[in-house]
Image (tube, rainbow, N blue to C red):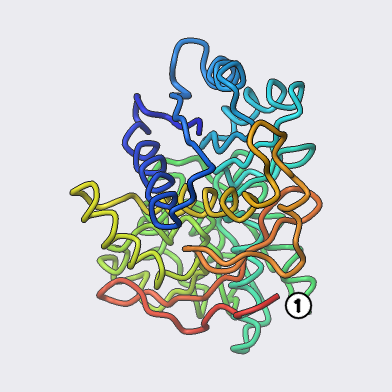
Amino acid sequence: MIVPLTGPDGSVGTSIANAAKLALLDTREQSIRVQVYDSNRTGGAAAATQQAIADGNRLILGPLLAEDVRAAAPVARSAGIPVIAFSNDEGVAGDGVYIMGVTPDQSISRVVAYARSKGANSFGGLVPTGLYGQRAAQSLIESVRRSGGRVNSIESYDRTPAAIGDAARRLNAKGPVDAVLIGDATRTAAIAAPTLKVGGHKLGTELWATDRTIGKTAALRGAWFSATPDTQFDRLVTRYRARYGKTPYRLASLGYDAMLLAVRSAPNWPIGRAFPAKTLIDKDGFAGVDGNFRFGRDGAAERLLEVRQVTAAGSSVVSPAATAF
């Protein structure tokens, strides 16, 4: 497992690694050993991958960040070792790399479909400049088109309060719509929401799912966003606290579920042999802490997501995740 153990994301990486170890304990699988390497070591994720391979590892879980996946993937690929990364960047998936993260495309498609089912026909969007904003905008356009709606306008902004407010006012000037996607984290959404006057409903992305204090912003109450189900994660939190004496980060579930994949493959993975990567492609998918998912041929995890509505207390489920593909 390659995750940040030091630096600004060190506590997140440690949480992911601890959850993976907990999965081994919970399943009582004796044939698998996990070794954890710091992606922030000297030489970065590439050096960590080289060390992991030299130590005899046959499967890489991680890294967390897309740039680290880009560094690690060629090293692992040259050794014929698959990578199950924790990124949500579809650009790093494929050719032996599988990503566990919820992608913007899946998240936006799910919440747009729900909004359409509730009568929304016209959509607007606020997205940041940069790669994530570009992908969010494209996802909005494509998902609305597939569902038979229309996109009136999408405005972009640099991440400063003034620029966010200006983008919201530009969107207001384009006329009313039934729903507006704020394709950014909740901190940005909290700045934009009070200024937006054109949308009947505000929509969020997967970035909203980790903020359980989102309801503190009154202007976001009633907004919809999609997320992985929390039921099994809440149970993981209880076991994690009992084992490690602290609460895990929400992304810890990715480490737990990645280890479950390895355990599921254990019967077809003789000790000392290559990991059977073909076991990762199953049309019926896998059940994990984050609900059901399966890997497509492109290496990205397709997830069954629920839709939540922001409330004063946080959020509540308004459309449960499907139970099967």
Which residue carries the number 1 mark? 147
Residue 86 rendering spot, x and y as whole percentages: 55, 43
Q: Is residue 84 above or below residue 119?
A: above
* Residue occupying the far left of the picture: 245
Q: Count of labels shown?
A: 1
Residue, x 35% and y 37% (percent of image)? 14
Residue, x 59% and y 63% (percent of image)? 107
Q: Which one is in front, 159 or 317?
A: 317
Residue, x 61% and y 21% (percent of image)? 53
Identify residue type, mark 1.
Answer: Ser
Left or right of 261 on screen, residue 316:
left
Determine whether the residue tagged by mark 1 lies in a helix, strand or loop.
Answer: loop
Quadrant, the C terminus: bottom right
Left or right of 86 on screen, residue 185:
left
Residue 40 rendering spot, x and y as whole percentages: 44, 20
Residue 77 rendering spot, x and y as whole percentages: 75, 27
Residue 104 rendering spot, x and y as whole percentages: 61, 55
Q: Is residue 259 above or below residue 237?
A: above
Residue, x 52% and y 82% (percent of image)? 320
